[in-house]
Amino acid sequence: MTTVLSIEKGVKGLLENLENIVNRTNKTEAAYSLHNRGIFYKYFKYRYLFIMMLPGLLYYIIFHYAPLYGIQIAFKEYMFKKGIWNSPWIGLSVFKHVFNLPTFWQVFRNTLIISLYNLIFGFPAPILLAVLLNEIRLRGFKKVVQTLSYLPHFISWVILGGLFIQFLSPSIGPVNIALKALTLPPVFFLGDPKWFRFTLVITDIWKSVGWGSIVYIAAISGIIDSQLYEAGEMDGASRIQKIIHITIPSLAPVITIMLIFAIGRIVNDNFDQIFNLYNPAVYSVGDVISTYIYRIGLGGMQYNTATAVGLFKNVIAFIMIVLANSLAKKINEYGIW
């Protein structure tokens, strides 16, 4: 009887081994077959994902890659009758002309200064708001604060420009009325070169701080383990200590990536904001590259000069983002690529 049972057990084991061998063989054949079908089969298999990508690809092709055709204007003596393709090539003459313009270096300096102010004061603002919101325990109050801080992002600079002009007016603006009540002299926020850059930075922070904090709030909610806060409380850490030693270090990867993007945009000024707020009285401190391109390109019809300035700005932006990414990877091993 014992011998019969052992034979049955041996047969079952042998059958299981044969079954495993057959399964492995089938899987190998299936993988080999899939590999031999080639890349077209894989594209067909994931065709719905590629269809979902089409709108995004079309957007970049139409609005970002197709306009690159016009870059050649910067190297041509553009004639409207001949068009872009038939206009004669003149090499780097347009760039030499641009670099000899004193107004170009003035707008380049203004762009760098305003962008640096935004980087120094505007970049930490969303991080600070996200950290403060994370410390609020009343959910209703927290949602109200978040909603109110997000709203300015959805208002166009065209509307905000009109509101700020009225709000900061030296004669009828509430701010200057309050200053007069305190026996202080009125301030020409949008007409005095000493105050214009300060006004740009403050209004930009007010508009973008809520929307910019979304990334950091999501990072705090998704990345940071709540057990770290509990461990900190058990060790007697205060709220400030938990922010410094838990929240900020956990946000380091996100902050690094956002900082790289911000540095890459250091020569990409906010055209909508400045165009709707500046005036000839503050051109010396407020005229930036994008408004300069608009004035000489569309206003002055100097298309090749405007294109050369725009191309120069984009090259500088590309170099800046590559350098920032390399530096970030050397410092803390985080980067975009």
Image: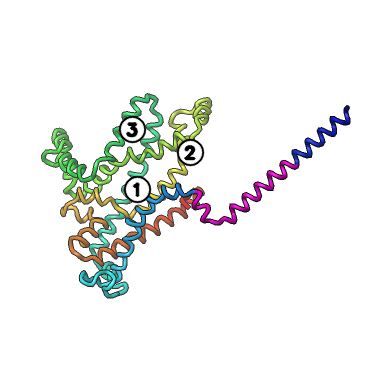
Q: Is 27 on the left-hand or right-hand side of 223?
A: right
Q: What residue type is labelled 2?
A: Ser
Secondary structure character of the magenta stretch overall = helix
Using the image as rendered, state which of residue 177 and residue 63 is in the foreground. Answer: 63
Examine the image and state in which quarter residue 322 appears.
bottom left
Amino acid at the residue labelled 1: Leu
Tell me the number on the disc at residue 146.
3
Give the percent coordinates (x, y) of residue 247: 46, 35
Mark 2 or 1: in front is 2
Mark closest to the chain's N terminus, 1 or 3: 1
Of helix, strand and loop, which one carries label 3?
helix
Q: Where is residue 267 in the image (x, y as percent from the top left)?
A: 32, 55
In this rendering, the answer to whether 136 lies above or below 244 is above
Q: Mark 1 points at which residue?
A: 119
Checking the image for residue 250, the label placed there is 2
Distance from Cα at disc 2 to Cα at disc 1: 21 Å
Q: Element at badge 2? A: helix
Quadrant of the drawing holding the N terminus? top right
* Residue type of the residue flagged with mark 3: Gln
Do the numbered discs 2 and 1 sit on residues whose CB atoms are within 8 Å?
A: no
Instruction: In this rendered view, identify the residue nearer to me: 40 or 292.
Output: 40
Residue 312 appears in the rendering? no
Identity of the residue drawn at 40% across and 59% down: 319
Q: Foreground mark, 1 or 3?
A: 3
Locate residue 225, reporting x and y percent: 51, 32
* Crowd around label 3: few <14 · some 14–19 · many ≥20 (10 Å): some
The alpha-carbon separation of the residues under discs 2 and 3 comes to 22 Å
> Which of pointers 2 and 3 lies earlier in the amino acid sequence?
3
Q: Distance between the residues labelled 1 and 3?
A: 22 Å
Can residue 296 be seen in this snapshot? yes
* SS assignment at label 1: helix
- Whether residue 321 appears in magenta in the rendering, the answer is no
